[in-house]
Amino acid sequence: MGRPVAIAVDLALLTVRDGQLDTVLVRRDPPPFARCWSLPGGLVREEEDVDAAVARILLAKTGLDPPHVEQLATYGAPDRDPRMRVVSVAYLVLLPIGAEPVETAGKDGARFFPVDAVSRGRRPPTPLAFDHARILTDAVDRARAKLEYTTLAATFLPAEFTLGDLRRVYESVWGVGLHHSNFARKVRSVHGFVEATGRRAASSGAPELFRRGPAELMMPPLMRA
Amino acid sequence: MGRPVAIAVDLALLTVRDGQLDTVLVRRDPPPFARCWSLPGGLVREEEDVDAAVARILLAKTGLDPPHVEQLATYGAPDRDPRMRVVSVAYLVLLPIGAEPVETAGKDGARFFPVDAVSRGRRPPTPLAFDHARILTDAVDRARAKLEYTTLAATFLPAEFTLGDLRRVYESVWGVGLHHSNFARKVRSVHGFVEATGRRAASSGAPELFRRGPAELMMPPLMRA
DNA sequence: AGAATAGTGTCTGTTAGACACTATTAG
DNA sequence: CTAATAGTGTCTAACAGACACTATTCT
């Protein structure tokens, strides 16, 4: 029946490092786009579920099962890969701060880059392969929007965190400053967003430690601007 | 390279009829799921863009280019079609009230069904083909959620409409009652949601006619519950 | 000591929800 | 006439933004 079609997955891995939203890019070896950077990804195998392919590739590239994986969108322009027709299902993956397994597993040169440097074309030095710049932009837009009306920000953090940690996640992802006091009031007021552990970061008087609550949606949302 | 893979698109067409959210289903002829109802859809052709396939199939099935088409999600379980591997990209399409071209073009038996009857399995008499029940549920969830924070409700209406018309769209899609007065206040307060035409539905004193404004997002959102 | 941060509290403007009242149109 | 609907206005409770004050920890 003519030209073969392949199904691929591409992963937009987002995390927060040094107060910035970062993504993971890998260095491509073979053409096309040789020596360019791209999102981690790979072809879906025969008889393999697409979601299963994501889990497999994620494990191979990062060595962990991440706290949040969601399907982002599918990119199906016929010429997006010059070799053959590849329809790619892109996923958004949020990694907790401090999970730095990518460097280890990154024999193929996986590295973190700040997303705003990438989207401005300042880093990496070469443009992203294929339509990955577009995919990354869509992923960042989705992540930024979802922080407003979901409790996903907590997935960027370890199991226990302070409200200051959580606020810094918002500030890093959105690139804005938030009032510490009003922020804490809002977060506490949303049932199930965070739960008090009873303990504190250091001695008494230090910031209180929280863990993630069962709520997934925030209604009404937490707004920027 | 083994078993062939096909790319398909499936369309969740939503509109409002008789105060209910309705979807369009078509009757399948060939097996599998012979004589079952399914979402309209079809295979993406070689060298055809996925979005272009949507436009083509939409034109063939409904005879119009609809006001809103957005990608919903991709369904890629390996066994979702028993014949061969078919990865399906599902789209959400909103049709304006009164656009009833489906019956005309529907030689293959296209019909409207209320989505809540479908999701409760009461109509049509046979379960939906493939994983289309799941796709439809996802589409309805997406549409209901998007009415909260976007101005998409207006795409269900003709070019000019009253605030009562718009409110009935919300009530039909959400299945709730809204206060006419508070609703109108909110809609008017969102810049660019609606624009006054200056005219009225009938003589003076009749409800004022509006058209869609340029705004796409509503911030803060319009909430249910 | 000084700076940064966490927690508490206050004040104010905005807005959503509930509801009342009037005018007009449709049946 | 009567019922339904559109438009206006009011009252109140909830909440976000801004900001002040204190205590504690880090440097």
Image: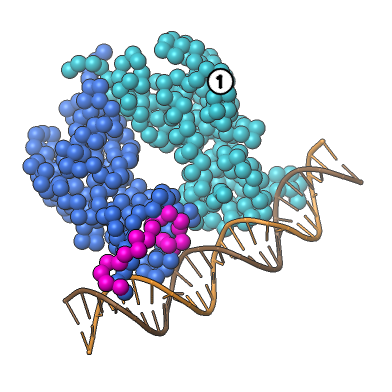
Chain colours: A cyan, B blue, C brown, D orange
Q: Is residue B99 left or right of residue C1?
A: left
Q: Position of residue D18 (x, y in %)?
A: 68, 56
Residue furthest to the top in view is A30
- Type of amino acid at the residue the image marks with label 1: Pro
Q: What residue is rendered at 23% in x and 42% in y? A: B65
Q: What residue is rendered at 43% in x and 62% in y? A: B188
Q: Nearer the viewer, residue A9 or C16?
A: C16
Q: Position of residue B111 (x, y in %)?
A: 14, 49
Quadrant placement of the N terminus of chain B: top left
Q: Position of residue B215 (x, y in %)?
A: 42, 50
Residue B11 visible from this viewpoint = yes
What span is in magenta?
A: B186-204
Q: Is residue B92 above or below residue A35?
A: below
Packing grade of label 1 (10 A; few <14, some 14-19, many >=20) is: some
Q: Nearer the viewer, residue A156 or A133?
A: A133
Q: Is residue B220 above or below residue B27?
A: below
Secondary element under disc 1, as helix, strand or loop, is loop
Q: Which residue is mark 1?
A: A124
Q: Is B197 one of the magenta-colored residues?
A: yes
Q: What residue is rendered at 32% in x and 26% in y? A: A77
Q: Nearer the viewer, residue A221 or B155?
A: B155
Q: What residue is rendered at 48% in x and 44% in y? A: A146
Quadrant placement of the C terminus of chain B: bottom left
Q: Position of residue B168 (x, y in %)?
A: 30, 63
Determine the image quadrant of residue B79: top left
- Determine the chain carrying the residue at label 1: A
Q: Is residue B210 above or below residue B10?
A: below
Q: Is A171 one of the magenta-colored residues?
A: no
